[in-house]
Amino acid sequence: MLKQLRFGLLALMTLATVLPLAAQVRHVTTVNPQSKRSYMEVYEFDYVDIQPQFPGGERGLINFINKTREYPYHAYKKRIQGRVLCSFIVGTDGKVSDVRVIRGAADESLNREAIRVIAAMPKWSVGKVGKHAVPVRVVLPINFRL
């Protein structure tokens, strides 16, 4: 009887710690300094029913990046290459905001250029959960190769 009670309590404690984590995997809360609201609920890209999409799809996104990206002169002269991993939010209106560098390149000018390219993107189609448009965090690498 005591063993069953211990097992039951252990299972209940495990379930109590796992359930809040499962609820938090679906979305994150982030500070939005550009609006009057101090917090905004943001969904992760893989956890929405309909994911946001760049106009023209993946091929359109690659073409846009290749057309818009300008290799910084300083980095080009020193033959610096790298990949900048950025995150940004596609809002409920499709606009790109809150662009951040997650993992930068060796040269800061490459990081600034990646932010500039992403900030210049046109409106995306919005992400949806059910029938409701929601803000979605997207992670995108920008490559700089010579």
Image (cartoon, helix red, strand yellow):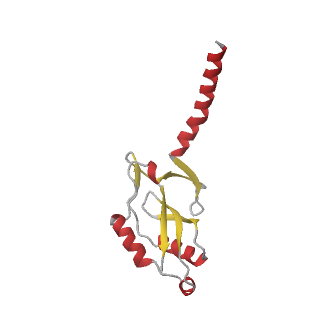
Closest to the observer: 134 or 3? 3
Closest to the observer: 92 or 116? 116
Q: For the image shown, how many numbered marks are present on the structure?
A: 0
Residue 123 position, x and y percent, is 40, 66
62 to the left or right of 26:
left
In the orientation shown, which residue stands out farthest toward the top?
1
84 to the left or right of 50:
right
Residue 84 position, x and y percent, is 53, 69
The residue lying at 46 percent from left, 54 percent from top is 45
Quadrant the N terminus occupies: top right
- Which quadrant of the structure image shows residue 66? bottom left
The residue lying at 33 percent from left, 66 percent from top is 56
The residue lying at 58 percent from left, 69 percent from top is 104
Closest to the observer: 41 or 55? 55
**Up/down of 138 relative to 144, above or below:** above
- Which quadrant of the structure image shows residue 35? bottom right
**Up/down of 41 relative to 32, above or below:** above
